[in-house]
Structures are given as C-alpha cells and as structure tokens.
Amino acid sequence: MNQNDHGYMTQYNDEIEIDLKDLMFTIFKKWRSVILFGLLIGCLAGGYKFISGVSALRDSVSRQADADDYDLALQEYTASKDFYKIQIKDLNDEIDRYNDYCKQSILMNIDPYKVYKNESTFYINTGYEVMPNVLNPSIDPTLAVMDAYASAVNSGNIYDEIQKKIGRDVDARYIKELVHVDENYSSGILTVTTIGDSQELADDIMKYLVEVLNNSTSDISTKVHTHTITQVSENSYNTVDKNIYTDFTENQDIADTSSVNDYIQNIKTQIASIKEASDKLEAPVDNTISRHSVLKNAVKFALIGIIGGVFVLAFIYAICYVINGKITTEEQIESRLHVNVLGAARKLVKRRSLSHMDELLMKLEGTDHEVLVTGPEYTAMQEKEVRHLYDISAANITALLHASPEIRTLALIGTISDDKIADLLHGIDAQLAQYTVKAAGNVIKNAHAIKTLQDADAAVIVEQKDISRYDNMQREIAMVNSLGKKLVGVIVM
C-alpha cells in the first residue's frame, strides 16, 4: 500500500460515521412490517392474557378468594385512612384550641414585666389544741376547714358571677386562672393571690373573693367545723414575675408564650408525619376476576405488546443497518468515501395500499432516491431509468476525463455480477467511443479483473444499492490507488 493509499485509509477511518437521518428513514420506510409485527405481538400478548383470564374466570373458588382478599384489604386501607384523618382533625382542633386560648386568655396576654397583684392573707382558727399525755388525740380540723375555703375559692360557679360583676367580656375560666390559693396548715394561714393586666382588675377580683370567703363561713362551720376566719392583711401592688404563666395557668403544657409556639410546632410536626404515613398507604388493587377485568387486562397487554413489538423490530432493523454496512444512497458514498458519483439509478417502488404514507416519507426525506410507480408503467419506467443512468454516467465520465487526454482505456470494476457490468458496458460503450472500455469485474477476488485493471489507464467502480457494501468498495478504491490508476468515480445501479 502506497503513501497515498495510507492517507486515504486514515482519512476514511477518521470520518466514517452513521448517518442518523438515513438510518431513521430506512426504518420508517419499513413501516408496514414494523406495524404488522407490532400487531402480531400485541395479538399474541392480548390473546394469552385473555385466555388465562377466562380460565381463571371459570374457577369460582379462586374468584371468591380474590374477592375476599380484596374486600379485606380495602377495609384495612379505608380504616387506616379514616384513622389518620381523625388524628389530623384532632391535632388541628388542638392547634385551634391553643390559638384561641392564647388570644382570649387574660393571663397569656399579661406582660410579665408589668404584673398587677393583690395578695390577701387569712387566719383560720378552729380552737384546736394539742393535749399533752393523751394517748388518742383528736384530729386537727384546721386542714379540712382550709380545704373547704380553697374549694370555695376554686369553685367554677362563683367566677360566672365575678365575670358579670367586673364587666370583662371573657369566659369565666379566664378569670379563674388569675387566682392562686396557698394553704399553710401548720399555721392556719390561707393566702389568696389575684393578678391582672391592671391593678383595678386584680383588686376587683380579690374584693369579690373576700365576699365569697365571708359568705362561706357559716356553711363551713356547720358542715365541717366551727371556726373563725380573719383577714390579716391585703397588699395591692405591681411587680415583675416571670413565673406567672407557670404558677397560675391550668394548662401545664404551657409555661409561656414561647412554649405555646413550641407546643404548636410540635403538633404541626406530628400532623406532617401522619400525612406522610397516610400518603404512603397504597390502595389495594382489585384483582378480582370478572369479564370486564379480563377484557381490560387483555386490551392492556395487547397495547403493551404492540408498542413493544414496534420498538423491537425497529431496533433489529437499526442493528442490521449498522452491521451490514450496505450502500443505501449516493450521498453517503460522497460523504463517507469522497468519491465522485457518476450516476445513480432511482429505486422504483410499486404503488400499493396506503402509498400516500410512502409519498409523505419521501417528501420528508427530501431526496429522489425512490419513485412510486403503478404496475402497468413499471417496465417502461424501469427502461427509462436505465437509459438515464447510462446517459448521465457517460456524460460525467467524458466531462471528468476531458482534461486527461492521456487516459484512453477504462476498466469497469465492482462486486456486483458480471452480467450487470456487461449490461452497463453495452449501454455506455457507444457514448464513449473515444475510449476503450473493458469490463473487469471483482478485483477483490478475481485475478483476471486485477490484470484488466492493471492494463487500463483509469477505473470506474460499479456498485448496486442495498447489495454492495462500503467495506468492499473501500478495498476496491485501495486497489485502484495501489496500482496507480486514476479513479474516475462510481456508478450506483
């Protein structure tokens, strides 16, 4: 192999590539077989599913088992969904309850740096004395009396009246949580503390609580034990108390406003977790066999089979296109092998059903490689195309060799049959009278063809679409170069 031959081979190997457009339209033009294959696979898949479904439909025991399993799974799914909905509703209600509480509660809206208080101290005397040297001393009734007064102060009924008297438009329970009672049993001291967002509110609540304590003395003396109650002191003042939320509220989940926010955020986190668990629940699939489900599954599998069959056969065609490496268009010869195309025959395609689809593909491809003809005009069109191929090939050879008067002998080489080369020679010989044209044939395998090429001044390669291969043509070009002959071009039949 000479230097020029080596350069050509390097250039060829560097530039060879798959023409995706050509590959795509090669597959598209086989649309009939692709669709028919897809329909066949679809019918097989759908038929198999239909037959197996009908067989299962006849099995009543299996049908009943499937129905029972589905009903049980559906009940569990529905129960789980409902349970999650109830949990989410309860937690949302809890958030609303705490938001309402923080909005309406007087206590939660008091500034801990500006707390108004009224603190009153009461002494309860039951007359109880511890007798020395007594084996069975009597029980001190002071404890019971103090508990009775504490119950009177904590009674929810009195706060409805207090709420009306102080004129605040809030629920009575928000008044009640402004009161704190402390009992010291050893000393008989009962301390009542009221707070408010104003000194007036704290004093008014204490005023009505004192009335309650005084009005309860007679009833407690009768039912519990005789005693006396004396208000020892009353102190009204404002102060800083960061513990008022903890000391006074009955909602022990709440210590202050920030704790409320943390508590609500924790509830929202729980809601998010429950929603996530609810979303992960998968509804059971009704696998119960019925005529409708059998038909539905058969249609579904048929569609899957059609789509799968189409893609499988298209993939097979693509693999064959890549592996075979056959010549499909003259443009590919020019772009891949950089050889002049002297003439190319168009492929005649007989019209058949749905030929308008073939016409559309030809228009989209934008070339004239193929032409649709009817049956009666096929023979006449074929003869016309052959004559045109001979004429255009002879004209191109004459034009290309016009500047090379030293060339007098041409060899027709190619991997196609000797008969086709002989037909071509017969068709162009009269138009190339100034040259001696010889039919050499296959220079890859035929020794006589090589000798004929060696005796000629130039060579013309003759190949056939969809039969000849690029790799063989490449070897022919290398042979021409190695013998130092001029390559005029290629004729594609």
Image (cartoon, helix red, strand yellow):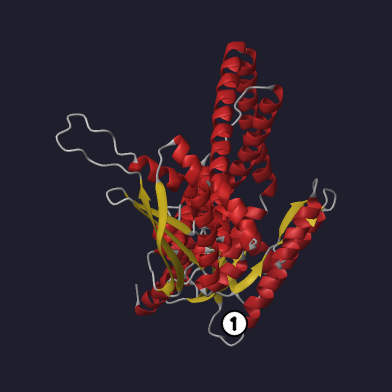
Image coordinates for residue 471, horizontal then vertical, percent: 46, 61
Callout 1 amino acid: Leu
| Quadrant of the rendered image containing residue 444 | bottom left
Quadrant of the rendering where the C terminus is positioned: bottom right
Q: Is residue 250 above or below residue 105?
A: above
Q: Is residue 215 above or below residue 256?
A: above
Badge 1 crowding class, 10 Å Cα cut-off, few under 14, some 14 to 19, many 20 or more, is some
Residue designated by label 1: 401
Residue at screen point 46% across, 60% down = 260
Identify which residue, 156 or 299, lies in the foreground. Answer: 156
Q: Is residue 446 in view from this perspective?
A: no
Q: Answer left or right for 36 relative to 176.
A: right
Q: Answer left or right for 433 relative to 103.
A: right
Residue at screen point 61% across, 57% down = 163
Secondary structure found at label 1: loop
Residue at screen point 79% across, 51% down = 355
Residue lying at the far left in this picture: please name it: 133
Quadrant of the rendering where the N terminus is positioned: bottom left
**Count of marks placed on residues:** 1
Identify which residue, 275 or 154, lies in the foreground. Answer: 154
Q: Is residue 170 above or below residue 316?
A: below
Image coordinates for residue 221, horizontal then vertical, percent: 45, 40
Residue lying at the far bottom in this picture: please name it: 403
Image coordinates for residue 95, horizontal then vertical, percent: 54, 54
